[in-house]
């Protein structure tokens, strides 16, 4: 497959042509993609199932993104990014990640025969780090997420830095989800949000296809970067959000794009904490959905809106697999 696109900076006008950078070399802003990005489905990612049910007269469609090859929607963006690295002739990829992105990058690097180094932090999920190593990636642990990000960026001159929070290629890869949900275009879309790649991928993919979803962004109580910038629709579950370890980015580089998308969609924000996540996770398990706590945040948000009488027919995107959290999930259920 080929790719007829270029990267450019909407802020200063810099054009990168056919090369790659994770952000603008001139002004440091996020880059955008102009043209058509094409990539093969390297591990069969995407086309995940949708399961519908009814809750108190409101229809709910669960989009099972946790059934992607490495257990999260991040496979969509990682596949496009690592394939691009391979096409450009890189022999190594580097990424900073709390878990799911790093695992996806490790898998697609293995698929294409590239070396992978994942910088993470010590508090990140142990199961995900074990799987990264099992896939052949070198995993480097740092005291904080910021340390991990700086270390990964420092290697960007010698390896392809995936930089999922920055990269328009990653967002473009995630945008494939929009084509799988066009039959629900009049429903609300309840989307867990941290770096914003899922939110922006869904938004941009749907606009390109000629429809506009109403997006309900869901953020963890301790990392609610959208709060105060978009309408707050509900808050539930208390002030802590340690269970949502995939929703931890407090200052995403594409925050202004995220704000614009939520506002233009006519949607808003739901902030969720540990108590609501724990309850929602238990309910999802009782329905047979084996998801990670950060995925359960989306169901917690729907429940909060439903309790206020403000829930509409909704697509709830279940982003990551609970199989990476087997001990945690078993412990929560026992309690």
Image (cartoon, grey):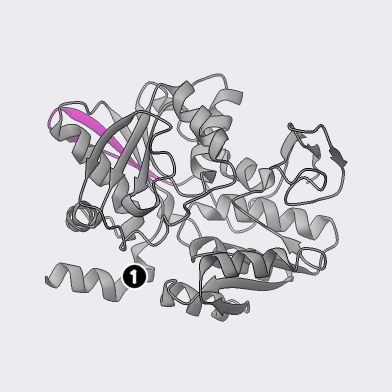
Residue at 59% across, 76% down: 135
Tell me, yes or no, whether the highlighted magenta stretch contains residue 61. yes
Q: Can you give x and y, in whole percent of width and height, for residue 243 in the image?
A: 30, 62
> Would you say the magenta stretch is mainly helix, strand or loop?
strand
State the quadrant of the C terminus.
bottom left
Seen from the viewer's position, the closer of residues 15 and 172 is: 15
Instruction: Provide the residue designation for mark 1.
Output: 325
Q: In the picture shown, does residue 104 fall above or below 76?
A: below
Q: Can you give x and y, in whole percent of width and height, for residue 226 in the image?
A: 43, 39
Q: What stretch is highlighted in magenta?
A: 49-63
Q: Can you give x and y, in whole percent of width and height, for residue 139 in the image?
A: 59, 78
Question: With 234 as the anchor, is 139 left or right in this view?
Answer: right
Tell me, yes or no, whether the highlighted magenta stretch contains residue 14. no
Q: Can you give x and y, in whole percent of width and height, for residue 102 in the image?
A: 56, 66
Q: In the picture shown, does residue 62 fall above or below 165?
A: above
Label 1 SS:
helix
Residue at 73% across, 56% down: 83
Question: With 188 as the anchor, is 115 left or right in this view?
Answer: right
Seen from the viewer's position, the closer of residues 87 and 157 is: 157
Q: In the picture shown, does residue 208 fall above or below 150?
A: above
Seen from the viewer's position, the closer of residues 261 and 2 is: 261
């Amino acid at each position: 497959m080929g790719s007829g696109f270029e990267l450019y900076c909407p802020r200063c006008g810099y054009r990168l042509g056919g090369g790659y950078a994770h952000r603008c070399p001139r002004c440091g802003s996020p880059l955008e993609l102009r043209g058509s990005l094409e990539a093969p489905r390297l591990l069969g990612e995407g086309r995940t199932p949708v399961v519908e049910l009814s809750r108190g007269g409101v229809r709910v469609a669960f989009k099972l993104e946790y059934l992607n090859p490495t257990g999260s929607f991040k496979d969509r963006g990682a596949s496009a990014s690592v394939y691009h690295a391979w096409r450009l002739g890189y022999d190594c990829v580097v990424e900073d990640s709390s878990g799911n992105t790093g695992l996806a990058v490790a898998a697609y690097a293995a698929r294409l025969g590239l070396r992978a180094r994942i910088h993470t932090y010590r508090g990140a999920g142990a199961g995900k780090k074990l799987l990264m190593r099992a896939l052949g990636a070198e995993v480097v642990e740092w005291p904080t997420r910021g340390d991990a990000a700086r270390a990964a960026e420092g290697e960007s001159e010698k390896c392809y830095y995936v930089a999922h929070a920055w990269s328009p290629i990653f967002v473009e890869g995630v945008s494939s989800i929009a084509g799988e949900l066009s039959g629900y275009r009049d429903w609300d879309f309840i989307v867990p949000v941290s770096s914003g790649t899922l939110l922006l991928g869904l938004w941009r993919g749907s606009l390109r296809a000629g429809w506009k979803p109403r997006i309900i962004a869901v953020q963890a109580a301790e990392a609610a970067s959208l709060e105060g910038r978009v309408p707050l629709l509900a808050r539930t579950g208390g002030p802590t959000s340690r269970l949502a370890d995939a929703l931890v980015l407090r200052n995403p580089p594409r925050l202004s794009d995220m704000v614009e998308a939520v506002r233009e969609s006519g949607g808003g924000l739901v902030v969720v904490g540990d108590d609501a996540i724990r309850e929602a996770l238990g309910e999802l398990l009782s329905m047979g959905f084996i998801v990670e706590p950060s995925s359960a945040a989306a169901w917690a948000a729907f429940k909060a809106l439903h309790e206020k009488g403000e829930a509409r027919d909704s697509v709830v995107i279940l982003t990551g697999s609970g199989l990476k959290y087997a001990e945690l999930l078993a412990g929560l259920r026992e309690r």
